[in-house]
Image (tube, rainbow, N blue to C red):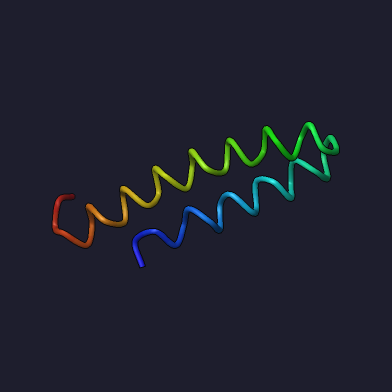
Amino acid sequence: MGCLPLPLAFALGAGIGYLADGQSGALWGALAGALLGLLASAGAVAYLRGRR
């Protein structure tokens, strides 16, 4: 459950980037989505473990 934001943000970022600027935008959007998903996953795991 903690890693779920990573693929969701990755795919969403790639889709939005593709709509904005084609293949180049999809690459940058996927990178931004992966970073955002990684941060969200770390936050979710920390929250579930009780470290707020």
At a point 26% along the width and 56% down the height, the residue shown is 45
**Is 45 on the left or on the right of 34, as rendered?**
left
Locate residue 26, reporting x and y percent.
74, 40
Locate residue 29, reporting x and y percent.
67, 38
- Can you name the residue that lies furthest to the left here? 50
**Is 20 on the left or on the right of 27, as rendered?**
right
Locate residue 43, reporting x and y percent.
31, 49
- Can you name the residue that lies furthest to the bottom here? 1
**Is 22 on the left or on the right of 43, as rendered?**
right
At a point 53% along the width and 56% down the height, the residue shown is 7
Q: Is residue 10 above or below residue 23?
A: below
Q: Is residue 31 above or below residue 12?
A: above
Q: Is residue 19 above or below residue 21?
A: below
Locate residue 37, reporting x and y percent.
47, 48
**Is 25 on the left or on the right of 29, as rendered?**
right
At a point 56% along the width and 58% down the height, the residue shown is 8
At a point 18% along the width and 50% down the height, the residue shown is 52
Q: Is residue 28 above or below residue 9?
A: above
- Number of marks present in the image shown: 0
Quarter of the image for the N terminus: give it: bottom left
